[in-house]
Image: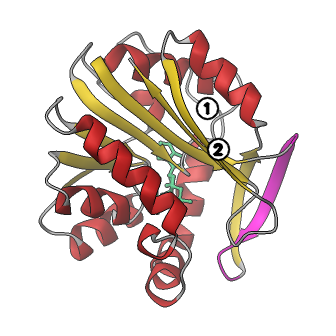
Amino acid sequence: MPSLTQPADLDGVRDSYDRVADNYVDMIATTSLGDIRHQPWLRAAMDVFADAVRGLGPVLDVGCGPGTITAYLAERGLDVSGVDLSPRMIEHARRLHPECTFGVGSATDLDLAEASWGGLLGWWSLFNLPRDVLPQVLSAFARALVPGGQLIVATHVGDGDVQRTEAYGGVAVRWTTHLWQPDQLLALIEQTGLTPKAELRLPAEGEIGPGVVLVAEA
Ligand SMILES: C[S@@+](CC[C@H](N)C(=O)[O-])C[C@H]1O[C@@H](n2cnc3c(N)ncnc32)[C@H](O)[C@@H]1O
């Protein structure tokens, strides 16, 4: 894979997710946020994705956090592993889901061989990537998928960039949430050569929105 531009704030983003990881895991355990088992539309999207990639090749959950989705897909019989920027998130993932394989790494620095993955996820994990870096990551994902392979992305919808200084229960963080309009993100995905397959919009009034889930096929 050609080397991608590395975000200037990557160290700060990593440290921030390390700091929030314990509260994030607690949030998943104690609320309906963060676990698709309690979010029927998100669960439905993930179930269709799982069916679509079954048998196509391995699946990589990029920005897997504590591995909730990785484990969900493993339960459905997929050959899935997870990777995350934050070592603390990966510590939790390994503790909570010892049956799965996890690694530490950035979406911008993955060794993704061409046409080798059946499925790739960027599940609420690509919004910290600078606007000029996200297209490079999506292109690398597109090259890495086998024909028929699927990309699923979930992200926050809006305009502009939000500088976050605290998250998940008042923990001090330093990261930028880059908001995307669904059509903008869809255009980026189409520019990689992938074919859009589905789009699920999550309204602002909902528990999670405004957000969007996009699925595209190689
Ligand atoms: C909101 S959490 C979502 C975690 C998980 N996908 C889930 O749905 O529970 C965002 C995750 O993205 C990870 N992340 C942020 N930037 C990343 C990058 N450049 N490469 C890999 N992971 C990244 C963070 O460490 C964090 O675990």
Q: Can residue 39 be seen from the camera position used here? A: yes
What is the three-letter code of the residue carrying label 1? Answer: Pro
Label 1 SS: loop
Above or below 132: residue 78:
below
Looking at the image, do the residues carrying marks 2 and 1 touch, with CB atoms under 8 Å apart?
A: yes
Membership of 208 in magenta stretch? no
Residue at the disc numbered 1: 7
Q: In which quarter of the image is residue 205?
A: bottom right
Q: Can residue 104 be seen from the camera position used here? A: no
Q: Where is residue 36 in the image (x, y as percent from the top left)?
A: 45, 67
> Magenta stretch: dominant SS?
strand
Give neighbour class at mark 2: few <14, some 14-19, many 20+ (Cα, 10 Å). many
Residue at the disc numbered 2: 128
What is the three-letter code of the residue carrying label 2? Answer: Asn
Going 60% across and 51% down the picture, which residue do you hit? 13
Q: Position of residue 127 (x, y in %)?
A: 64, 44
Instruction: Magenta stretch: give its range.
Output: 159-169
